[in-house]
Image: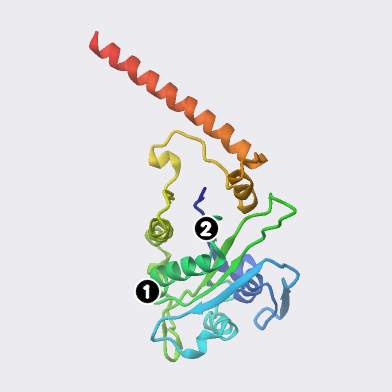
């Protein structure tokens, strides 16, 4: 069952973050941070699948290199406590293939960020382990620039409009829409929502992701721990639904009296 997930966090020097550190993490590489004078090493993590850079048409072609773009982002910020960018975390649907994940994240990044003038560095991770069904959390990371760009580099002033909460709400909605379009194109009766269950007016407990292994076993008629948990949750939700229907009938009878 597809699960929705999107988080936005600042890359802030005041909080001890850096673009180089964020880049090393999402690329699972060992990189030197010229600004901080330190090395970040995440090469021991083995769940890396794919990365690419997406830039607006008016950006310098040199920004197509993630290291060049990373250094330019750091150099554009003069303040010791300034924010150098943003980091987006996305939960990916277990039901899709790695190539479909790439298409999904690329489409979302182009529609949500590149279209308004941001440069993006994206990476996809998949920690699936056939020997450990609990490790099945495919996800994507996107590093975003904080300033408008032209063919000479980054503009001196940041686009403060990108800080508005309305943009975060828009990105959350777009992430749901991009996924739902793909599900519909595949003919699947699956949908996700960026709204909480409470906001959606849904009185139910959310189920947990099954994961590829559990899905395969369940399809063969083999019960799994995650499948059992979801069945227990679904039973509780059905009881809530039945109770709600009962209460509705009781209220209707009271009105008819």
Q: Residue furthest top?
A: 257
Q: Residue at x 56, y 34 (%)?
A: 233
Residue 257 placement, left or right of 85: left
State which quarter of the image contains the C terminus. Answer: top left
Please say if 248 is above or below 141.
Answer: above
Q: Residues within 10 Å of mark 1 (few under 14, many from 20)?
A: few
Task: Identify the residue position indicated by label 1 in the image.
Answer: 115
Query: Is residue 133 or residue 83 the one in the foreground?
Result: 133
Do callouts 2 and 1 mark residues in contact (Cβ within 8 Å)?
no
Say how the picture is coloured.
rainbow
Q: CA distance from mark 2 to mark 1?
A: 20 Å
Query: Residue 85: percent from the left, percent from the top?
Result: 52, 72
Q: Residue at x 48, y 67 (%)?
A: 105
Residue 87 placement, left or right of 175: right
The secondary element bearing badge 2 is classed as strand
Task: Identify the residue position indicated by label 2 in the image.
Answer: 7
The quadrant in which residue 141 appears is bottom right
Query: Is residue 253 or residue 35 the one in the foreground?
Result: 253
First in residue order: circle 2 vs circle 1: 2
The secondary element bearing badge 1 is classed as helix
Q: Residues within 10 Å of mark 2 (few under 14, many from 20)?
A: few
Query: Is residue 106 or residue 254 the one in the foreground?
Result: 106
Task: Note whether residue 94 is visible.
Answer: yes
Please say if 7 is above or below 31.
Answer: above
Query: Residue 90: percent from the left, percent from the top?
Result: 53, 60
Residue 5 placement, left or right of 46: left
């Amino acid at each position: 069952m597809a699960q929705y997930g999107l988080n936005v966090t600042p890359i802030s020097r005041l909080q001890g973050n850096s673009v180089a550190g964020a880049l090393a993490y999402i690329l699972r590489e060992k990189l030197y941070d010229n600004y901080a004078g330190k090395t970040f090493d995440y090469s021991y993590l083995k769940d890396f699948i794919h990365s690419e850079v997406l830039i607006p048409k008016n950006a310098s072609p040199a920004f197509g290199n993630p290291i060049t773009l990373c250094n330019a982002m750091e150099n554009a910020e003069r303040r010791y406590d300034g924010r150098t960018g943003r980091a987006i975390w996305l939960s990916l649907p277990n039901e899709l293939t790695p190539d479909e994940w790439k298409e999904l994240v690329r489409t979302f990044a182009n529609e949500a960020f590149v279209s308004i003038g941001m440069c993006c560095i994206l990476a996809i991770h998949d920690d699936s382990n056939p020997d450990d069904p609990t490790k099945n959390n495919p996800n994507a990371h996107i590093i975003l620039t904080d300033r408008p760009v032209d063919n000479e580099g980054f503009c001196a002033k940041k686009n403060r409009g990108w800080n508005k909460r309305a943009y975060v709400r828009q990105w959350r909605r777009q992430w749901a829409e991009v996924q739902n379009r793909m599900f519909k194109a595949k003919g699947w009766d699956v949908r996700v929502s960026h709204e909480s269950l409470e906001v959606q007016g849904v009185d139910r407990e959310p189920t947990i992701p099954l994961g590829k292994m559990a899905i395969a076993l369940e399809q063969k008629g083999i019960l799994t721990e995650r499948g059992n948990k979801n069945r227990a949750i679904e039973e509780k939700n059905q009881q809530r639904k039945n109770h709600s229907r009962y209460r509705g009938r009781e209220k209707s009878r009271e009105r008819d009296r």
